């Protein structure tokens, strides 16, 4: 501190030069880091013959402050991504992600949150499925094997979040990366086909595109991941915490 | 004690006429199932909220009743009451027929019934449903062996042992069926250890009622009556079973009423939630419990009327009870975020609408008819019916 005080006064041009070098440095650093960030993304991609392991645990953090009431871009993106088309029968049409409007019974505070498969660590749907069609990958993604689902709907009875849909009628416009089947049960796959390629789920991308950034996807097992940092930085909660399911989808700020 | 002689039922116009009606009902059930599978389940009243509907009410009723239909055989061979022996074979046949009827409804309601083989080859042993597949097929196998022990004189000495196994098995089976609902920890309307013992008493009650009804039918078709003394004993027993079910139902609701968290659900099921509250009070409590209890336990009424009427009311009350339990339990909204009111395009926070469709009725009634048909044809093919004793009055 004393040494600083003893320094000669800088010339008037010095601040401008310093600012220039600082900004240039940041720019160069960003240019250097950007491919690196992309490389990190690519590093998340998994080769087709590479097994899924518990080294990752994919999850989602939903910031309820940023999630806009009336916005359903995440729902539309999910429907588009997976070829989910309604038949004008909302009680039997499939919904993998839905916006739920909430009102605090005591204070009247209102908010809107997306609800989807919570990808539980202890998924009740997996426990009750008689054939093992409902299963949890080692990386935490809960899926339905459409080849051995017999359509008994016991998993729908067991799901604490009503996050599953039964396909009540003939399907059209299926996507090759998201096979579905009449008479079977389905739910959010966390866009597993994208995740395996190192990409983000469609709902997360859509939310980012809209400028809300209410959804953050990442690896809960990676201490350096943005998702993990955010979950450590603020209080988060899971839905139906009394069931102790340790969900991979977490909500913050409510 | 003289040896009971058995014979098959007589071929008569009334017998084949009844079988004809049942065949038509079975065909309607098959057509309904085909329609549901080809068009998809949207043609039913079932939705993403009420995922189990009328077929499940019938299927669970038939499966639970199948276990209870073995009461007579159990009383004879496990508890050594030889006076029940004359109806033991009939009891075994009825149990198998009801189980086949119930399982048929359950399988034909699946989204993919063509994948039944998958259910036989892929097991998740953490699933109570998978355990039930073993319990049902095992029960069927044990009943067949049990009947063999009864039919084959050289094997008669094993009847008690196999009967004891069958008795234990059916208690486990109804425990398993009750646990299908009891293990649903996420749903406040179901999650309860009380459902297992409740299902056991329900099976004793419904099974005895159906034994009295179908037993009376098959005897009537050959121009006889069910043995009067045995009918009286079974009717009295049924009266006590009905009261036992009533007690467990009362305890279950009182326990829920005691906890603040369950009071809204109880209010829905018992007061506000029509048609469930009406079905509970009128179908389950009045017609299914109080009236049959009086009819079956009081000596004031003519047995020829009070017993079949009481048994029929137990069946109607049983179906009402399962409707309230299975469908009412799903219709009430599940709270996802505690302390918040919820609304969405997926019907969060609202009472789910459910109206059973014709295909569902067709499939359910078809399953009941299939059970009755197997029972009747069984009595025609093999000697299940006891030859009446000289003191037994003819119809």
Image (tube, rainbow, N blue to C red):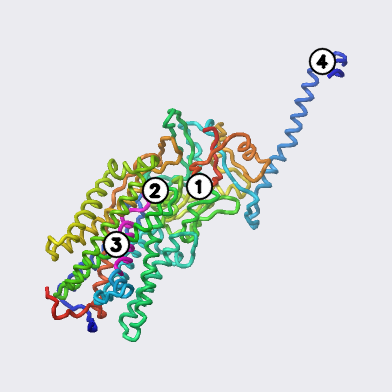
Disc 4/disc 3 C-alpha distance (Å):
91 Å
Question: Which residue in the structure is indicated by mark 4?
Answer: A13
Write down the chain letter for disc 1. A
Q: How dense is the environment of label 2, judged by Cα within 10 Å: few (below 14), some, or many (20 and up)?
A: many
User: Which quarter shows the N terminus of chain A?
Assistant: top right
Q: Distance between the residues labelled 3 and 1?
A: 34 Å
User: Which of disc 3 and disc 2 is earlier in sequence?
Assistant: 3
The secondary element bearing badge 1 is classed as loop
Measured in 3D between alpha carbons, the distance from the residue under mark 2 to the one under mark 3, in whole angstroms, is: 24 Å
> What range is drawn magenta here?
B49-70
* Mark 2 vs mark 3: in front: 2
Q: In which quarter of the image is residue B19?
A: bottom left
Counting other residues with Cα less than 10 Å from the Cα at mark 3, is it few (<14), some (14-19), or many (20 or more)? Answer: some
Residue closer to the observer: B38 or B283: B283
How far is mark 2 from mark 1, CA to CA? 15 Å
Q: Residue B48 — which label?
A: 2
In percent of the image, x 35 and y 76: which residue is there?
B144
Same chain shared by disc 4 and disc 3: no
Question: Would you name the residue on which mark 3 appears?
Answer: B31
Q: How far apart are marks 4 and 2 (CA)?
A: 70 Å
- Look at mark 1 in the image and give the residue it sits on: A188
Badge 2: chain ID: B
């Amino acid at each position: 501190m004393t040494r600083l005080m003893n320094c000669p006064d800088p010339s008037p041009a010095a601040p401008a030069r310093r600012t220039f070098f600082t900004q240039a440095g940041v720019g160069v650093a960003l240019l250097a880091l950007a491919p690196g960030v992309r490389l990190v993304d690519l590093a998340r991609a998994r080769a087709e013959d590479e097994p899924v392991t518990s080294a990752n645990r994919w999850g989602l953090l939903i910031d309820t402050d940023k999630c806009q009431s009336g916005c359903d871009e995440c729902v539309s993106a999910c429907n588009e991504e997976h070829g989910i088309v309604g038949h004008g029968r909302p009680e039997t049409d499939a919904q993998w992600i839905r916006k739920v409007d909430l009102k605090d019974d005591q204070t009247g505070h209102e908010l809107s949150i997306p609800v989807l498969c919570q990808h539980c660590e202890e998924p009740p749907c997996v426990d009750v499925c008689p054939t093992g069609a409902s299963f949890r990958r080692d990386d935490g993604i809960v899926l339905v094997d459409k080849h051995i689902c017999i359509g008994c709907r016991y998993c729908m009875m067991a799901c604490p979040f009503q996050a599953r849909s039964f396909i009540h009628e003939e399907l059209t416009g299926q996507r090759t990366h998201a096979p579905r089947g009449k008479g079977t049960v389905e739910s959010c796959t966390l866009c597993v086909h994208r995740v395996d390629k190192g990409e983000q789920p469609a709902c997360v991308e859509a939310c980012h595109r809209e400028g809300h950034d209410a959804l953050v996807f990442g690896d809960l097992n990676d201490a350096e991941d943005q998702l993990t940092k955010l979950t450590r930085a603020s209080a988060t909660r899971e839905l139906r915490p009394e069931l102790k399911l340790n969900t991979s989808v977490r909500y913050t700020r409510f | 004690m003289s040896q009971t002689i058995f014979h098959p039922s007589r071929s008569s116009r009334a017998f084949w006429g009844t079988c004809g009606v049942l065949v038509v009902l079975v065909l309607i059930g098959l057509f309904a199932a085909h329609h549901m599978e080809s068009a998809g389940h949207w043609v039913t009243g079932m939705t993403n909220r009420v995922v189990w509907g009328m077929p499940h009410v019938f299927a669970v009723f038939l499966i639970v009743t199948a276990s209870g239909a073995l009461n007579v055989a159990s009383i004879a061979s496990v508890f050594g009451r030889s006076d029940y022996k004359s109806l033991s074979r009939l009891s075994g046949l009825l149990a198998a027929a009801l189980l086949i009827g119930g399982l048929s409804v359950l399988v034909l309601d699946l989204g993919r019934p063509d994948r039944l083989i998958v259910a036989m080859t892929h097991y998740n042993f953490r699933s109570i449903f998978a355990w039930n597949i073993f319990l049902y097929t095992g029960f069927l196998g044990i009943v067949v062996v049990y009947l063999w022990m009864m039919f084959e004189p050289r094997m008669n000495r094993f009847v008690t042992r196999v009967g004891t196994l069958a008795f234990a098995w059916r208690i486990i089976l109804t425990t398993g069926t009750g646990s299908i609902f009891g293990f649903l920890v996420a749903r406040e309307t179901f999650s309860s250890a009380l459902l297992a013992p409740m299902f056991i008493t329900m099976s004793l009650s419904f099974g005895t009622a159906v034994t009295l009804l179908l037993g009376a039918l098959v005897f009537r078709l050959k121009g006889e009556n069910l043995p009067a003394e045995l009918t009286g004993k079974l009717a009295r027993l049924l009266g006590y079973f009905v009261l036992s079910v009533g007690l467990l139902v009362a305890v279950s609701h009182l326990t829920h009423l005691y906890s603040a968290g369950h009071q809204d659900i109880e209010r829905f099921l018992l007061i506000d939630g029509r048609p469930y509250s009406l079905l509970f009070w009128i179908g389950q409590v009045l017609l299914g419990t109080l009236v049959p209890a009086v009819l079956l336990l009081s000596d004031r009424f003519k047995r020829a009327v009070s017993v079949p009427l009481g048994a029929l009311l137990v069946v109607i009350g049983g179906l009402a009870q399962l409707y309230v339990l299975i469908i009412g339990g799903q219709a009430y909204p599940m709270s996802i975020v505690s302390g918040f009111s919820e609304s969405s395009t997926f019907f969060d926070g609202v009472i789910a609408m459910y109206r059973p469709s014709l295909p569902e009725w067709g499939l359910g009634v078809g399953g009941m008819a299939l059970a009755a048909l197997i029972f009747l044809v069984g009595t025609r093919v093999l000697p299940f019916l006891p030859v009446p004793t000289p003191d037994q009055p003819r119809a």
